[in-house]
Amino acid sequence: MATPAPPRWDRRMQQRLARGEEAALGELYDRYASLVHSLAHRVLDDDEAANHITREVFGFLWENPDAYDPRRGSLRSWIAALTQRRAVQRLRHAENRSRSSQDEVEAKVREANTAARADFIVTSMPAPLRDALELAYFRRRDYRQAAADLGVTEDEARRRLRLGLQLLSTAMAPAAHAGLDGRQR
């Protein structure tokens, strides 16, 4: 089945745009700007974004007049399809940015919660366990050196370090298995 020839106006308009006639762009804008803006606004539900899409579409038409193929349909339908594609692209991009931003915020909240839990655990653990951990991590002492500094046996120093680390590890567990609201997943 043969595609009907597009109206003469469409072909002439494309030729005028290809020659760089600014008046042709003005005529095209006068005829189709409200269509482009309303389609973009329908997709984006944002007047400023619809204005941006309108400028984008007409800028594209001015810079790429040969992108329109008159054999594939009317100029009006091609402009409408171009507008729809641009608006949907912008909407998807905005949604992805929003989703990415939400993910970053959630990650920061989880990190802050974990740090707060770890701080609470360290400050509330018995002093002998806290002292052993501080020697090991802040002063870089191994269990033998920590035992000597604390005046306890090596076995006791290992036990204190192990218990302190076990308590501290619980700060991480809820973040890995629960949502932000604290419920188990």
Image (tube, rainbow, N blue to C red):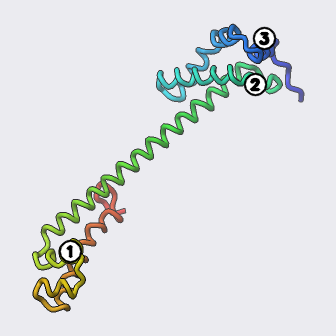
- In the picture shown, does residue 176 fall above or below 96? below
Q: Amino acid at mark 3?
A: Trp
Asked if residue 106 lies left or right of residue 62, the reply is left
- The crowd level at tag 2 (other Cα within 10 Å; few <14, some 14-19, many 20+) is some
Q: CA distance from mark 3 to mark 1?
A: 83 Å
Residue 24 image offset from top left, x and y in percent: 71, 10
133 or 125: nearer the viewer: 133
Residue annotated with mark 3: 9
Asked if residue 37 lies left or right of residue 19, the reply is left
Which numbered disc, 2 or 1, marks the residue that appears first in the sequence? 2
Which numbered disc, 3 or 1, marks the residue that appears first in the sequence? 3
Determine the secondary structure under disc 1.
loop
Q: CA distance from mark 2 to mark 1?
A: 71 Å
Please state, as top left, top right, bottom left or bottom right, where the N terminus lies in the image.
top right
Q: Residue furthest right?
A: 1
Residue annotated with mark 1: 139
Please state, as top left, top right, bottom left or bottom right, where the C terminus lies in the image.
bottom left
64 or 138: nearer the viewer: 138
Give the image quarter of residue 144: bottom left
* Residue in the image at 27% along x and 61% along y: 114
Asked if residue 166 lies left or right of residue 18, the reply is left
Give the image quarter of residue 156: bottom left
Residue 83 image offset from top left, x and y in percent: 62, 26
